[in-house]
Amino acid sequence: MMTSPTVDDLLEGFIVALQNEIMPHVGSPKAYTMCQMLQSLIQEVRQVMPVYDTYVAEEHNGMTRVLRETAAVLGSVNGPEADRIRERAATLGSKADVPMPPDQEPIRAAHRELGYALQDCITDLDVLQRAGHSEADAALQVIRGHLMGRIVRDTETITAGAGMAGRG
Amino acid sequence: MEQSVAALMQQVLPEISNVSIEGFEQIAGGFSRETFKCDARVTRNGSEEVLPLILRKDPPDVEAILHTDRSVEHNLIESLRLRTTIPVSRSYGYEMDPAPFGHPAMLLERATGSGQTSALFNGGADEDQAESVIKHLCEVLVELHSCSIDKIDPDGALTDPFHRGIDIKSWDAFMDSTIEFFESSYTSLNYDPMLMIALDAVYTLRRNKPRPMPLAIVHGDFNPANFLYENGQVSALIDWEASRVGDPREDLGWMVLMDVVSDAHVMDYPKKEGGFLAYYNKLTGNDITPEELGYFTLFGTMQIAVPVQQFVSRRVNKEYMLLLPYYVAQSSIPAFPLMSKLMGYEGVPA
């Protein structure tokens, strides 16, 4: 997977393209307003996406704790309602905390650094290949084997439909 | 803009008068230039005529995929139109002064025929024409590649039209200088390390040069979207801005790749002749092998990939904010498996 442009770069691009490349050509006030709504929703996705998994995990762990604390505060109150609250604390409230998703930025930075290291290996291997070291041919195939898996997966993941819009 | 179109028409066709421009609108028309269509209603020899026109205008420099010259494109088109039977749209003229149109621009006759070439394939409405259209397309390409370079381009404008440092004094010089250009350009396009596939392609091309072949004028962007057709024939080969002197196998190779990217099947036709390469070989006697075709698919890909990925790179770096480069980047992804296959990556899917 490429780390540049980021998904956020793409989303930002959609908002800018709507503003500069589409909305000036939209004649219908209704459609113009829909474009503005679309920009607002895309901006929502930009804001939500970086924190979504973290917030869900935090809130999951927070709710288990709250279930337990709620039951604890009730103490020895009797009755079916109180029993149901204690039951929830004992079951759902005892769920283990889910792990917090790691910060993606350092992972992407490291991914990028490793990618450029492979790129530099390809350059060094080319020199060795031209110098007649057949081992370099085999070494290059190791890198290519890694890339091939990514190429197949990226193609499946990124492409959408066949052909190119606006070109015949 | 309409006034500038009328003024340019009046300038290049002094015999016309009462020029009025109608139906002026921007059309999709490729990715590299801004393209508009309109009709010029004119009076000539006392009679009223309607001239269908295409205006091709340069984008701002930073937004350009290819930095090409409208005067060079005009001169080539007119040279081909007057000296060959290659179907091209007449180029009426060009304006290099940015004042009238905002950027340099050229005016062409709007050729008849359909540009919806996808209708020729995959069960499209014109699939019954595919055999004859593509057969003619192949004949057109053979005629182009058979042209005398000196005759078509007497001033040498197509020697190195994009100022890449290309040397055409021999086939080897051309190949070496072009591959050197690919390599030196890499740092300006590797916005993501995954582009190392392109770098691998550059080195692979340098290590595996095939047999030489006489250089020719190549179209330079010979792909399924760059021709019009009607009545089973090619009515125009269009978009000549990437044309230059090169190895004729580049056009064939680029079509192979663009067939994949565009979900087209030009190279499968004419089926009665065993496909595009077989028919091309039959007409030229060149005996281009599938291996050579593969090499030049990679080579032709790099010819276009360099400016295209530089275009994407400038957008990723936010030097400008158009949407198109992101779409181009997405559309380029299907090229990677084919490039990998041509380089001998293991595990390429069938």
Image (cartoon, coloured by chain):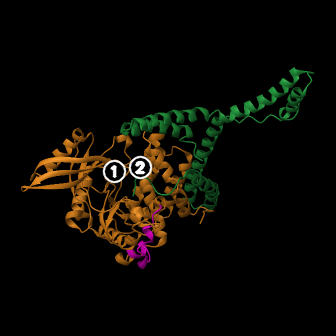
Chain colours: A green, B orange
Splitting the image into 4 quarters, where does residue A4 fall?
top right
Residue shown at 39%/62% (left/top)?
B117
Work out which residue is located at the far front of the displayed protein and give it: A80
Q: Nearer the viewer, mark 1 or mark 2?
A: 2
**Residue under pointer 2:** B307
The chain letter for the residue carrying disc 2 is: B
| Magenta range | B263-280
Judge whether B122 appears above or below A9 on screen.
below
Front position in the image: B166 or A30: A30
Q: Is residue A157 above or below residue A73?
A: below
**Residue at horizontal 47%, vertical 66%?**
B122
Q: Which mark is residue B23?
A: none
Q: Is residue B40 left or right of residue A149?
A: left
Residue B157, image x, y percentages: 26, 55
At label 1, the amino acid type is Phe
For the residue labelled by badge 1, is the local secondary structure a helix, a strand or a loop? loop
Q: Which mark is residue B162?
A: 1
Which one is in front, B6 or A2?
B6
- Chain letter of disc 1 in the image: B
- CB atoms at circles 1 and 2 under 8 Å apart? yes
The mark that comes first in sequence, 1 or 2, is 1
In front of the other: B130 or B198: B130
Residue B278 at x, y percent in the picture = 42, 76
| Residue B200 makes an appearance in the image | yes
